[in-house]
Image (cartoon, grey):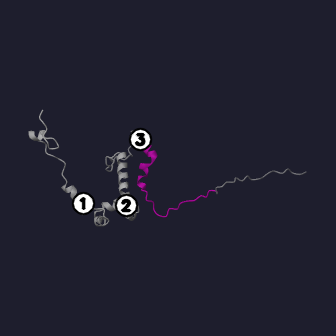
């Protein structure tokens, strides 16, 4: 009598991905993480403190600091940008090429007062240029004296007197 054959075939799963290889990271240098705060920042400890006190105390209590932002809305800012790009496009091609056709590079160059002689040689400034620092020092404050006499009170902004009512 013959013994029945048993099937012992292995099913092989075909995949386009190679089998995963395990890898480990070997830390050679000491860690820069401060382990002294491990207990303080452990989420289990934070939750435990919250359940006892009802206060989350791990948040930053410092006042936020913001940079100065001009008070332009989006439309005004876009118009300023488009105007600057248009003015840059009006420059001669040789000058634009010196700045890689990049208005930002030109603006950085133009804002540096040390480049004034170079800008004058390019024909971009007049001889009567006054640096911004000198203008701000000599500029009027914009404050005017309040009118004190009847003549001043009745005078119009154009300098002609208004008739009395």
Q: Nearer the viewer, residue 11 or 54?
A: 11
Query: How far across and down, in percent of the image, does residue 26 sit?
Result: 52, 62
Residue at 20% across, 56% down: 137
Q: Which element carries disc 1, helix, strand or loop?
A: loop
| Apparent side of residue 82 relative to residue 130 in the rendered image (left or right) | right
Q: Which residues are magenta?
A: 19-48
Mark 2 or mark 3, which is nearer to you?
Answer: 2
Write down the residue under mark 3: 50
Q: Which element carries disc 2, helix, strand or loop?
A: helix
Residue at 34% across, 59% down: 107
Mark 1 or mark 3, which is nearer to you?
Answer: 1
| Apparent side of residue 14 relative to residue 129 in the rendered image (left or right) | right
| Apparent side of residue 158 relative to residue 16 in the rendered image (left or right) | left
Q: Which element carries disc 3, helix, strand or loop?
A: helix
Residues tagged 1 and 3 counted as in contact (Cβ below 8 A): no
User: Quick check: 146 above or below 120?
Assistant: above
Mark sitting earlier along the chain (2/3): 3
Mark sitting earlier along the chain (1/3): 3
Magenta stretch containing residue 90, yes or no?
no
Image mark for residue 105: 2
Query: Furthest-top residue in view?
Result: 165
Mark sitting earlier along the chain (2/1): 2
**What whole-number distance in Å separates the C-alpha atoms at marks 2 and 3?**
53 Å
Query: How far across and down, in percent of the image, does residue 81 sit?
Result: 37, 52
Residue at 37% across, 51% down: 82
**What whole-number distance in Å separates the C-alpha atoms at marks 1 and 3?**
59 Å
Write down the residue under mark 1: 131
């Amino acid at each position: 009598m013959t013994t029945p054959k048993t099937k012992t075939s292995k099913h092989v799963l075909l995949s386009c991905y190679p089998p995963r290889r395990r890898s480990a990271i070997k830390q050679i240098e000491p860690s820069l993480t401060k382990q002294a705060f491990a207990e303080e920042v452990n989420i289990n400890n934070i939750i435990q403190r919250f359940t006892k006190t009802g206060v989350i105390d791990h948040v930053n209590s410092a006042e936020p600091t913001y940079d100065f932002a001009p008070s332009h809305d989006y439309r005004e800012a876009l118009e300023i940008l488009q105007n600057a790009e248009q003015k840059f496009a009006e420059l001669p091609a040789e000058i634009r090429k010196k700045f890689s056709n990049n208005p930002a590079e030109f603006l950085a160059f133009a804002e540096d007062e040390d480049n004034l002689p170079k800008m004058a040689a390019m024909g971009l400034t007049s001889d009567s240029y006054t640096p911004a620092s000198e203008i701000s020092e000599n500029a009027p404050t914009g404050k005017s004296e309040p009118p004190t006499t009847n003549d001043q009170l009745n005078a119009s902004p154009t300098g002609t007197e208004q008739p009395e009512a």
